Image (spheres, helix red, strand yellow):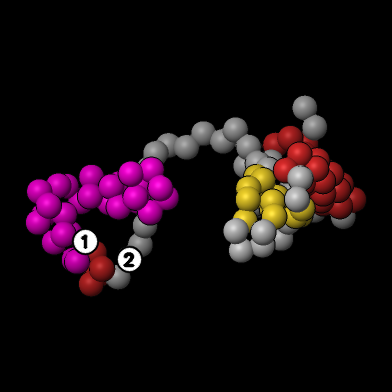
Amino acid sequence: MKTSDKYLKIVEWSEDDGCYVGTCPGLIYGGVHGDDETKVYQELCQVVAEAVELYEADNKPLPPATANREYSGRFVLRVSKELHREIAVRALRSGESLNSYCQKILKKAVGQG
């Protein structure tokens, strides 16, 4: 496996740009774009490989890998006391635990619910 394979590469259609945009969060800022999804992915892979080479040439540590990452399903989110109270009250009103209510809201926000 090449070191560049350890980084998540995303190609998606952008309505704002009117083309495909390829990004590699956590390794490069910005990305590549074009009208052909396959070509954008190929170019993105090349850019990621070049970024890895630059890190190595400069003897800089690479950012943590982002591909095939395991997630625990748990994260801590800090919010203001006021927001915490408002969300807790809304959860109570809906008859849900705070955790279940927040899961529902997050799923809806990312288009899974």
Q: Report whether residue 7 is seen.
A: yes
Q: Quadrant of the N terminus?
A: top right
- The circle on residue 43 is none
SS class of the residue under badge 2? loop
Q: Residue at x 40, y 48 (%)?
A: 111
Q: Which residue is mark 2?
A: 79
User: How packed is label 1: few (under 14 Cα within 10 Å), some, or many (20 or more)?
Assistant: some
Q: Residue at x 61, y 63 (%)?
A: 16
Q: Where does the image place residue 104, in percent across and percent down from the top left? A: 28, 47
Q: Where does the image place residue 22, in percent across and percent down from the top left? A: 70, 50
Q: Report whether residue 29 is seen.
A: no
Q: Where does the image place residue 57, in percent across and percent down from the top left? A: 90, 50
Q: Residue at x 34, y 50 (%)?
A: 108
Q: Where does the image place residue 81, in percent across and percent down from the top left? A: 24, 70
Mark 2 or mark 1: which comes first in sequence?
A: 2
Q: Which residues are magenta?
A: 85-113
- The circle on residue 87 is 1
Task: Give the quadrant of residue 64.
Answer: top right
Q: Report the magenta stretch's main SS.
A: helix
